[in-house]
Image (cartoon, rainbow, N blue to C red):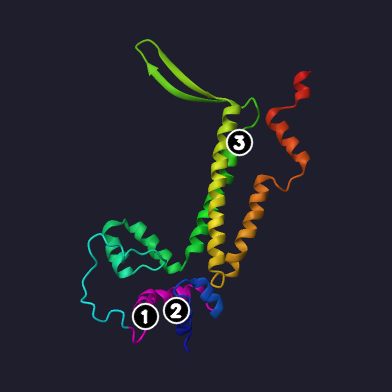
Amino acid sequence: MEKWDEAFKLFQESNGHITSQKIADKLGVKLSQVKYWRKKFKWKDKLNKNRGAPLGNKNALGNKGGGAPTGNLNNFKHGNYIDESKFSSKKFLAKYMPKATSKIIDDIEDSGINSLDILWINITTQLAAIIRSQKIMHVKSKNDLTKVLKKETWGENSSSKEYELQFAWDKQANFLQAQSKAMKTLEGLINSYEKLLHTNWDLASEEQKARVEKLKAEISKLNGDDKEMEDISETEEDIYGNEEEENN
């Protein structure tokens, strides 16, 4: 059996869920080669054509044909599979989507990423935003004051400016609130990833299985769960100042 046949067989056996990277690893070929076969031989189209009722199935016997009554939702897709010829043909997408968006969709299809990979991208994007916000919303000390121009008016002989003052405690409270919401969203994404991972455990790659534990370790560092107690007092001193020095 040729390599491309073996590759498609793996794709077919997984019902289209296996990634191109995993196929490449199993067959010992380059990822770009698998992507090329996937596109050239139209694996998704072949897989969809091969789907159908088993030989001898008589479910449709005596059916006069015709569509379902208006408003019937039998054809609404709740699973992972959607008939591309009806719902996501590239011809249809090209009419309504910008070329850049269509190109991204093509790249996503060619990459062979699955639901787990998409969830992982969302998780890492959310975590990156949380880490970045640490620097943007950092409160240096209790004297940290931000002055923002809110309004400016001009007259014939004079002008006036109105400023909004953001005090350290306001900024810290806003930061904690935003951080709490962001961490809650991240936690929900991780839970969804773990649930989907264990549902499709046999189809998941070793990399996909190892991701969560590594991520939890990173979040533990971010939250400071692995710090000693004295580290907390040093952080508080940096933000709120030393009470003894202030009293002197």
Q: Are marks 3 and 1 in contact (CB under 8 Å)?
A: no
Relative to 129, residue 173 above or below? above
Which mark, by number, is residue 192?
none
The residues bearing labels 1 and 2 have C-alpha atoms spaced at a distance of 9 Å
Q: Is residue 202 above or below residue 218?
A: below
For residue 148, side relative to residue 140 (left or right): left
Figure check: 93 above or below 9:
above
What span is colored magenta in the figure? 29-57
Q: Secondary structure at mark 2?
A: helix
* Label annotation for residue 50: 1
> Circle 3 is placed at which residue position?
138
Q: Give the residue at x 57% y 28%.
A: 170
The secondary structure that most of the magenta stretch takes on is: helix
Judging by the rendered image, the residue that carries numbered circle 2 is 12
Q: Amino acid at mark 2?
A: Gln
Type of the residue with mark 1:
Asn
Q: Residue at x 77, y 44 (%)?
A: 228
Along the viewing direction, whichever of 5 and 36 lies nearer the viewer = 5
Image coordinates for residue 20, horizontal then vertical, percent? 49, 72
Task: Looking at the picture, tell me which residue is in the foreground, 156 or 42.
Answer: 42
Q: Seen from this angle, which residue lies furthest top?
A: 157
Work out whether mark 2 precedes mark 3 in sequence or the reverse, and give the earlier one: 2
Residue 48 among magenta residues? yes
- Which is more foreground, mark 2 or mark 3? 2
Depth check, front residue: 100 or 171: 171
**Residue 108, horizontal then vertical, whole percent:** 43, 64
Identify the image quadrant of residue 141: top right
